[in-house]
Amino acid sequence: MFDHTKIDFEVEKFSLIQSYEDYEGFNTQDKVPSDIGVGLRRKDTKQVLGIVSDNYAITQYDEIVNGVEEALALAQVDTTDAWFTTEVHDGGAKLELRAKFPAHAMSMRDGADVVEPEFCFRSSHNGTWANNGMMGLWRHSCFNTLVSGDKLAYVYGRHTKNFNVPAFASKIQKAGEFISGTGLDRMRDWYDTTITRDQAINLFTKTLAVRTDNVTRKKEHNKVMLSNLMKIFDEENRHLHGKGLYEGYSERNKGTLWSAYNAATYWSSHPNSKRGADHNVKVNREDRVRKMLHSNEWAGLETKSMALAA
């Protein structure tokens, strides 16, 4: 899909050295403490790409590209006549990926023109571009996450803050399944089914965030888990149905079942705790999501949508 020859290199950190003439006139070199900063360079050419903090998390370009390609393959996206571009700028400091899928051209709403699904992503090692990716059907997009059309998946954030390649790839896979026909009709219904924030709270309270109190043996909700789910739900609404970064956080009191679905799948694939690396945690969460999709609460929201449409 993408041109791997352009990203066939790795980036590493290196210690900074300051050189100066000391009081006796000798040229002296001292190592700069890492808590002040470290350098970032290519391993192959040793070209310096920038200066970052010591806790900067390096995400190699091939890890991102491999994750996106695997997600598109799992979603069974038809790449007939598709075009892919891979652009590396400033000696490897910045990366831009784009793709368009003519085989899945469609109209999202009655009376709308035909639109071809697109994927675009930007990242950088020197901090000039944040991790910023989108997939959907639009006529115009900008990298401040504002689009004219329908955005099905997004990611926005710095390398050092909450960027998780598997979680991003999972979002791209769900968007790919939307456009490729895998459960297309049901997913399109979810995208068009409006739900209130209160309905989302009720859904998560009775499904993903439910727990049994060991003392009373009664079902209660996990407040921390519910809070995390609603934070993701609000962000999904902001980016998928709102104005992205142009819209203030938590200004939108309505979303869709698609927002709830994406919030649930992101939560299941991106544990925030120290136990997040435990495979069993993800398996357990994915099982909870499957049960949510077969719950009475989810079915009730789908039924209300069909009733309104009738």
Image (spheres, rainbow, N blue to C red):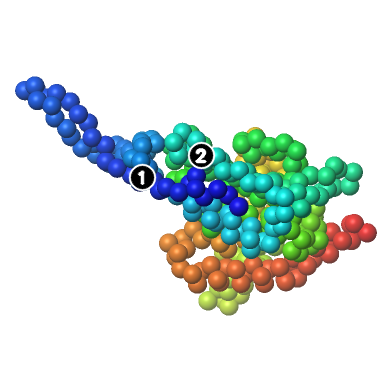
Q: Looking at the image, is 225 positioned above or below residue 232?
A: below
Query: Would you name the residue on which mark 1 appears?
Result: 44
Residue 70: x %, y % from top left:
58, 60
- Earlier along the polypeptide chain: callout 1 or callout 2? 1
How packed mark 1 is, by other alpha carbons closer than 10 Å (few <14, some 14-19, many 20 or more), is few
> Does any portion of residue 76 appear in the rendered image?
yes
Left or right of 43 in this view: 193: right
Residue 49: x %, y % from top left:
39, 36
**What's the amino acid at mark 1?**
Asp
Residues 190 and 102: in front is 102
Residue 83: x %, y % from top left:
67, 46
Q: Looking at the image, is 150 positioned above or below residue 206?
A: above
The numbered disc on residue 88 is 2
Which residue appears farthest toward the left when viewing the image?
Answer: 24
For residue 283, which quarter of the picture?
Answer: bottom right
**What's the amino acid at mark 2?**
Val
